[in-house]
Image: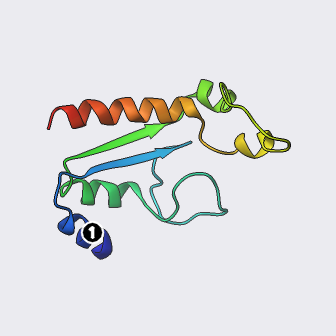
Amino acid sequence: MARMRSLLNRAICPVQLLWIGHGPPAETGYCRELGPDPLFVTKGMLEEIAAQAASLTICVTTREEQEKPTRGMFFGLGEEKVAWALLGPDIHLRAARDLSEKILKL
């Protein structure tokens, strides 16, 4: 947390925090395996550090985004399988829209 606070204190512009993942922030920092979501950042950490930021946006994939993560994407040979494990363009577009709304209010 100290490093997160230090980083935010050094920012010379309003900081917009973004959590983007297949699921919401974990209650604990423990994880059983590596996965696509941010590791070692808990819900409590985000709530605590959000007080120093201009905003906190939490963007969790919907069932449709999880079922069609590669919609609209093009791939080279063997790349599509890997892309299925990543966050797709739809969740990124939604996160960008959510952030844009907050940034426009500054």
The answer to whether 86 is drawn above or below residue 64 in the figure is below
Q: Which residue occupies 47% across, 30% down?
A: 93
The answer to whether 20 is drawn above or below residue 26 in the figure is above
Residue 87, position as x, y percentages in the image: 59, 41
**Residue 22 or residue 14, whichever sits in front:** 14
Q: Is residue 96 left or right of residue 75?
A: left
Residue farthest toward the right in the current orientation of the protein: 77
Instruction: Name the amino acid, label 1.
Output: Leu
Q: Quadrant of residue 10?
A: bottom left
Residue farthest toward the bottom in the current orientation of the protein: 2
Q: Is residue 69 left or right of residue 50?
A: right
Residue 59, position as x, y percentages in the image: 43, 38
Q: Label 1 belongs to which residue?
A: 7
Q: Is residue 19 left or right of residue 74?
A: left
Q: Which residue occupies 18% across, 51% down?
A: 14
Q: Which residue occupies 30% across, 68% down?
A: 4
Quadrant where the C terminus sits is top left
**Residue 76 or residue 31, whichever sits in front:** 76
Residue 28, position as x, y percentages in the image: 47, 62
The answer to whether 57 is drawn above or below residue 89 in the figure is below
Q: Is residue 100 left or right of residue 64?
A: left
**Residue 72 or residue 90, whichever sits in front:** 72
Neighbour class for label 1 at 10 Å: few (<14), some, many (≥20)? few
Q: Which residue occupies 60% across, 36% down?
A: 88
**Residue 6 or residue 26, whichever sits in front:** 6
Residue 50, position as x, y percentages in the image: 24, 53
